[in-house]
Amino acid sequence: MSDAAITKLSAVELAADIAAGQVSSVEATRAYLDAISARDGEIQAFNEVFAEGALEQAAAVDERIAAGDNPGPLAGVPIALKDNICTTTGHTTCASRYLKDFRAPYQATVVEKLISAGAVILGKCNMDEFAMGSSTENSAARTTCNPWDLSRVPGGSSGGSAAAVAGRLCAAALGSDTGGSIRQPASLCGVVGFKPTYGRVSRYGLVAFGSSLDQIGPLATTVDDAALLTGVISGHDPHDATSLPEAVPDYPAKTDKPIDKLRIGLPKEFFDNADLTAAIDPAVRLAMDSAIETYKSLGAEFVEVSIPHSRIDVDADGGLSSFAVACYYIVCTAECSSNLARFDGVHYGHRSSAPVENIVELYSRSRAESLGDEVKRRIMLGNYSLSSGYYDAYYNKALKVRRLIADDFARAFAKCDVLLGPTAPTPAFKIGAKADNPLAMYAEDIFTISVNLAGLPGISIPAGLSEDTPALPVGVQLIGPVLSEATLLRTARMFEQATDPAGEKFIPPMVKGK
Amino acid sequence: MSKIIDAELVRHIGKLSRISLSDAEVAALGEQIGAMVEYFDKLQQLDTNAVEPMAHAVELTNVLAPDEPGQSLSPAEALANSPQHDENFFKVPKVLGADS
């Protein structure tokens, strides 16, 4: 099989071909390493490629298959990881100067699970530093470009993972999602991005940002691939006390079964708002309209629901704001100020070489020299809202609003199976366009953020292409109740089957070779 | 207009955060934090008197683990990433009497 033929396959197809002996894992791994050599010079998705380790893993899988073994559902499939997921191979940098040389002493549970399922770990993908951002521009490592238009961002914070999948530099990837960090880059890069229910996937070995919000999930070219990866990485883990004990359904077995009498909720806060309709990009509106038409033609029933505390307000300049975004930035910065306190310049990471009088000065200088502006800003904000005199007005208030947001969703799901909405208000924007405006950047997550606050699963699926030259992909988002992964994946698969059965619509021109 | 977070308050938060700040950073952060805090004030529009705070999305309680010794890092592994160490100890400057 040619390199181009291999990298065109979905992860499910590649696993089947490897298991059937049509292609070896070493050939598949070489095909992706060649794709990285050919295209990642421009895309810059990877912070580190484990060429040697991946080929060794691949050879071991091939040997097991030759010996008649079944190495698992991802046998020989090359997978990339966001650089905040700990691996004992190579570095885990979180795209931070602070962790530039860090080698994790243990492996994340998701990595152990991928390897047990036969996957080949291809390398680590770029991200916003410590997952804080929506464009991957807050990286100390490199600037990742969108494979659809290299002058644009891939979204973030899992922008490297999304760009690697879109650029066909790996068969699939893992990212992490704290406020939209899997779904928004998936939308901007034309791939499927799935954030499972909070606690469905172990966070052990994921460098913590907002512990009550963080969740690992897949980025993939098809819904079936997302289902396969989700099944592999899900499950209870004694190393993560917040991981859920519920058994993991066989997601891939169910995706092709359409949902009978599907009821889709349209939040009126997203649809019945002329100012918002005017403020979001026309390509996003078109993608939403066509998604509604598609589901109607598939027999879905639409119901209007209300999630008032996720309401989006539009200011005179078209700027977007919401209670949910305010609530999220209080909660996530508070959690980050605590989580990132471990970066002290003593145990690991960057240590200042400036002469210091005492340990507090060592901490303060080491952090000042090695953390980026956005990370400093969030730590400071978190310490502000947690500090004495402000705690009730901000942090405690936000926790109460969080419950109001979660209760809204619970009420909405009494009337429907899933909610449909945009993933992001815009397609990919130009590199640098929002870099100096944190509030404009925070608005990128305005449709995704409440989902994390409520702990729900959400999936972004490619739904349209913009009129730009070159055209840019746009995703739509499906949201489900707690532990509704199987329903969400089936609903997403219905759409994919109706709109892009051959999986050809969302391949960037640079990959197609035009 | 954003809320005024004055230089003294910014420096105080910087100290709590253990981040040394230049004068230029103090000025910029004052403005940026002020804009965010003003955004946070949006929540004051909501009546939350009868609402219980929600700290976690999925509220598990009493998660217990068996009280058995497990694997942990060896001293060599634990020290492998440390910028400075001495035998089995992390090396730090003076701690006692340090300004906290």
Image: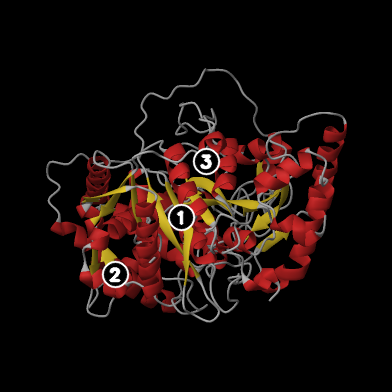
Q: Which disc is residue A256 wearing?
A: 3
Coordinates of residue B11 in the picture (x, y in percent)? 37, 67
| Figure quadrant of the N terminus of chain A | bottom right
* Horizontal side of residue A84 vs A488, given as left or right: right
At label 2, the amino acid type is Leu
The image quarter in which residue A510 lies: bottom right
The answer to whether A298 is drawn above or below residue B13 in the figure is above
Q: Are marks 1 and 2 in contact (CB under 8 Å)?
A: no
Type of amino acid under label 1:
Ser
The residue tagged with tag 2: helix, strand or loop? Answer: strand
Cα separation, mark 1 vs mark 2, equals 20 Å
Mark 2 vs mark 3: in front? 3
The answer to whether A412 is drawn above or below residue B9 in the figure is above
Which label's residue is closer to the chain start, 2 or 3? Answer: 3
Q: Quarter of the image containing the C terminus of chain A?
A: bottom right
Residue found at the far top of this picture: B67
Quarter-of-image position of residue A76: top right
Q: Residue A460 carries which label?
A: 1
